[in-house]
Image (spheres, grey):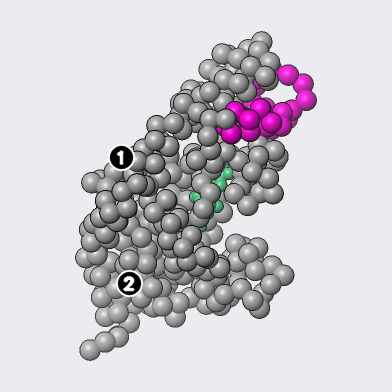
Amino acid sequence: MKKTIFSGIQPSGVVHIGNYFGAIKQWVEMQNEADFSVFCIVDLHAITVPQDPTELKENIYKMAALYLAAGIDPQKSALFVQSSRPEHTELSWLLNCNTTMGELNRMTQFKEKSESKKDSVSAGLFNYPVLMAADILLYGATHVPVGEDQKQHVELTRDVAERFNAKYGQCFTIPEPIIKNTSARIMGLDNPLKKMSKSAASSNNYIAISDSADEISSKIKKAVTDSGQGITKDKDKPAISNLINIYAEATGMSVEDIEKKYSGKGYGDFKKELADVLIAYLEPIQNEYNRILQDKTALTQILTDGSSKIAGIAQATVSSVKEAIGLGL
Ligand code: AMP
Ligand code: TRP
């Protein structure tokens, strides 16, 4: 069977190494194995919570530049902005009428995000998983790489698609979620028991892709460590284990090789070298990112080309779904 990958990421301001190792790097690797990959900057999902218009526009460009700097190849894959293809909102409505309130009420992300403000969150936030289902089903995606937190949404997509196919005939491909391995779950530098997050109270929690060499050194130096000593990965040593994971991601070295290399050495030495490794890893990405971001015209062209490349597929899906439902003339 043809392997088609679809994934989306919200254009949010800070992108940290958790996002990078957990999502962005994985997309780049997957584009080489797939027959076709579609990567979407999901601005329509972003507006389910309040956004500043000027910042949102800038963040869309920044996210696109980062993906390109990371190695998304616009020849092999389609990189585009969700709101540039009207079929996403169109299919979303058609699916909304085939999704129950009960199903959406069970979504844990909505429960978490709407907690204590049930009446003031937008209806869009409630319907968010249906728009995500539309994203995936429009392109007949077979594989959807996502973080653990999005698994329930992909399962809802499968349920909605299966029910739709049973009722109206075969319209949709049933997608498979691809959940990255646990080593890509990067934890906070100031609290290794919680995942690294841009909404953490302190910026010492994360290393942003845009952090300078000095910032990276200082944040790694301040990162909490475990009691005891030794550079070994162990569930009783969550802080060092997390730093070892980051080292492994940035160098491609195995955990065993890292442990061997630092056997007999202290936390201080390891942290210093980790900072150096991370700075060296991020430097070419940062340079490329800054270069790409300077030429908004070229960037717009890549995103417009991406959108044109997939227009036919999206339009054909919407037409067949409308036809199946009995809409139009
Ligand atoms: P978010 O910015 O939370 O919407 O996440 C964007 C993508 O990065 C999703 O695929 C997340 O699963 C992934 N991600 C976010 N934080 C981390 C983390 N600390 N470790 C690994 N992956 C993460
Ligand atoms: N909801 C996803 C997130 O916040 C982003 C997303 C939107 C997505 N549409 C998608 C991911 C379709 C995979 C497939 O991370």
Name the residue nearer the viewer: 3 or 226. Answer: 226
C-alpha separation, residue under disc 1 versus residue under disc 2: 28 Å
Residue 105: x and y, percent? 60, 72
Q: How many marks?
A: 2
What label sits on residue 147 in the rendered view? none
Seen at 62% across and 23% down, the residue is 271
- For label 1, the residue is 32
Q: Is residue 216 magenta?
A: yes
Q: In the image, is the residue at mark 1 within 8 Å of ligand 2 by its beta carbon?
A: no
Secondary structure of residue under mark 1 = loop
Seen at 51% across and 46% down, the residue is 15
What label sits on residue 86 in the rendered view? 2
Seen at 34% across and 46% down, the residue is 294
Asked if one can make out residue 255 in the rendered structure from this viewpoint, the answer is no
Secondary structure of residue under mark 2 = loop
Left or right of 228? Residue 238 is left
Seen at 65% across and 21% down, the residue is 232
Residue 57: x and y, percent? 42, 61
At label 2, counting other C-alpha atoms closer than 10 Å, the crowd grade (few under 14, some 14-19, many 20 or more) is few
Residue 241: x and y, percent? 64, 29
Q: State the extent of the magenta-drawn residues as a range.
A: 215-240
For marks 1 and 2 on the same chain, the one whose residue lies earlier in the sequence: 1
Left or right of 94? Residue 119 is right
Name above or below for residue 209 compared with residue 149.
above
> Which circle, 1 or 2, is nearer the viewer?
2
Q: Amino acid at mark 1?
A: Asn
Q: Is residue 37 magenta?
A: no
Q: Please identify the residue farthest to the bottom as the structure is shown.
A: 329
